[in-house]
Image: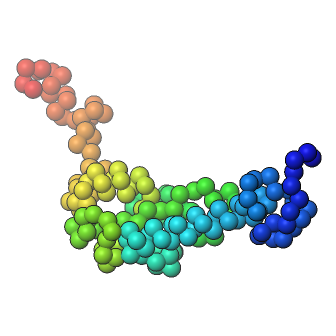
Amino acid sequence: MAGSRRRACKGCGSTTRRLDKPGPRCASCHRDEVDRRREASWIRHIWQTYRLTAVAYWLIYVKQGGACAICQRAKGRPQFPQSHEKRRKRLAVDHDHRCCPTTPTCGKCTRGLCCTTCNKRVLGHFRDDPEAFLRGAEYLRNPPAKGIVDGAGEASEALERDPDRG
C-alpha cells in the first residue's frame, strides 16, 4: 500500500505488520500499551484516593464474590478480563464518609466495593444512614398500600359505603 511504513515494532520487533498509527508500535502492541497504561493509572488512582493497593482491591472483590456488595447483580470488571469484558467498569470503592468526608481518605475506612448505581444513588441518597435501609426493607416486606389498593381492605370498603367518613 502506498504510504505504509515498514519499520520494526517497538513492542514485538515485527517488520511484517504495518505501523499505521503515528508511533513506533503495531496495532496489537499499541492496544497492549494502552491497556498497560490504563491499568497503571487505575492503580495510582485507587492508592492516591483511597490508600488502597490493587492487591487489597482484588482481595475485597473476591471476598464479595466478584459482585456489588449491595445489589449482588453488578459484577464489575474482573481482574484478568477477556476481550469482551475489557469495557466493563470496575466496581467503585466505598468508604465511610463519617471518617473521611472528602478524598483522599485515610485508607482505614474502606467498606467494600459497589456498583456506581448502589454507591451513588442508594448509599449517596440514604447518606449512609442504616435506619433508612431498615425502613426500606420493612417497606418492601409490609407495603402500606397492601390491603387498600387490592380492594380487600376494610377501610376501602367503609369509604365506598360512606365517602363522608374519610
**75 to the left or right of 151:** right
The residue lying at 50 percent from left, 76 percent from top is: 54
As drawn, 36 above or below 136: below
In the image, is residue 161 above or below residue 60? above
- Residue 158 on image: x %, y %: 14, 27
| Residue 80 found in image quarter | bottom right
Q: Which residue is located at x 7 percent, y 20 percent?
A: 164
- In percent of width and height, residue 75 lies at 53, 61
Q: Visible in this render: residue 19? A: yes
Q: Residue at x 64, y 64 (%)?
A: 35
Q: Is residue 82 above or below residue 155?
A: below
- Quarter of the C terminus within the rendering: top left
Tell me the colour scheme of the image: rainbow
Res. 60 visible in picture: no
The single residue placed furthest to the left in the displayed view is: 165
Mark count? 0
Q: Residue at x 30, y 33 (%)?
A: 150
143 relative to 161 in the view: left or right: right
Residue 4, position as x, y percentages in the image:
87, 51
State the image coordinates of residue 53 (x, y, percent, origin top left): 46, 77
- Residue 116 sits in which quadrant? bottom left
Given residues 34 and 67, the one toward you in this image is 34
Horizontal side, residue 86 vs residue 54: left or right: right
Q: Nearer the viewer, residue 41 or 105?
A: 41
Q: Nearer the viewer, residue 142 or 15?
A: 15
